Image: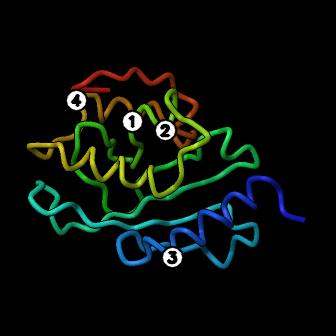
Amino acid sequence: MLSRAQKRLQREYEEMIRHYSETFPLEIPDSDPNRMTWYVSFVGAEGSVYAGERYTLEFKFSDSYPIEAPDVIFKGAYPHHQHVYSNGYICLSILYDDWSPSMKVSSVVMSIQSMLSSATQKSRPTNDASFISYAGGRSPKTFNWIFEDEKC
C-alpha cells in the first residue's frame, strides 16, 4: 500500500513526465524502490550568466511530504551563486520557512532556475568556507537559515 507521500509523488511524477520531460528531465534511481529520491536536471536560462549550463537537483522526500519540504541540493556541478554553497546546499526560503504543501517539484525547480536567472555575476556566498566546515553531512533543514535579499 502506498503512503500519502508516495501517492502525491506518483501524481507529480506523472505530471513531470507529461509536461516537463524535456525541460526538466527526471531520474529516479533503481536502487530506491520507494521512489523517494529524485534527480531533476535543468539548463540555465538564456540571457542569464548561467545560460546553457546544466545542473542537477537531488530531491529527498520523507513520508511527511508534502506537509514537510523535501531536502533539495545541487548534485554534481554546483553553480557559483551567492545563495548556493559549494556543498550544493541552497539558501532559498521556499525550501525551509516558506514551504507550502501546495508546492510541487516543478515549482521548486522553476524557483531555483529563476533565482539563478536573477544573478548578474557568478560568486559564492561570502561565508562559504566556514559554512561548509560547519555543515558536515547534515541535512540542510537542520540549519537556522536567515534569508536576506543579498546573502544567506
Query: In the picture provided, is 130 more to the left or to the right than 120?
Result: right
Q: Position of residue 98 (x, y in %)?
A: 49, 29
Q: Position of residue 36 (x, y in %)?
A: 67, 61
- Tell me whether the residue at label 1 lies in contact with that at label 2, contact meaning CB atoms closer than 8 angstroms: yes
Residue receiving disc 4: 126
**Label 2, label 4: how far apart the Cα atoms are:** 21 Å
Query: In the picture provided, is 42 more to the left or to the right than 141?
Result: left
Q: Secondary structure at mark 1?
A: loop
Query: In the picture provided, is 50 more to the left or to the right than 68?
Result: left
Q: Nearer the viewer, residue 65 or 139?
A: 65
Upstream in the sequence, badge 2 or badge 4? 2
Res. 61 mark: none
Q: Is residue 17 above or below residue 61?
A: below
Upstream in the sequence, badge 1 or badge 3? 3
User: Where on the picture, by quarter, is residue 53?
Assistant: bottom left
* Residue drawn 53% across the image and 74% down it: 27
* Residue drawn 35% across the image and 71% down it: 23
Q: Is residue 27 above or below residue 113?
A: below
Residue receiving disc 2: 95
Local crowd size for mark 2, using a 10 Å CA cut-off: few (<14), some (14–19), many (≥20)? many
Q: Amino acid at mark 2?
A: Leu
Q: Secondary structure at mark 4?
A: loop
Q: Position of residue 61 (x, y in %)?
A: 65, 52
Question: Which quadrant would the N terminus be assigned to in this image?
Answer: bottom right
Residue receiving disc 1: 92
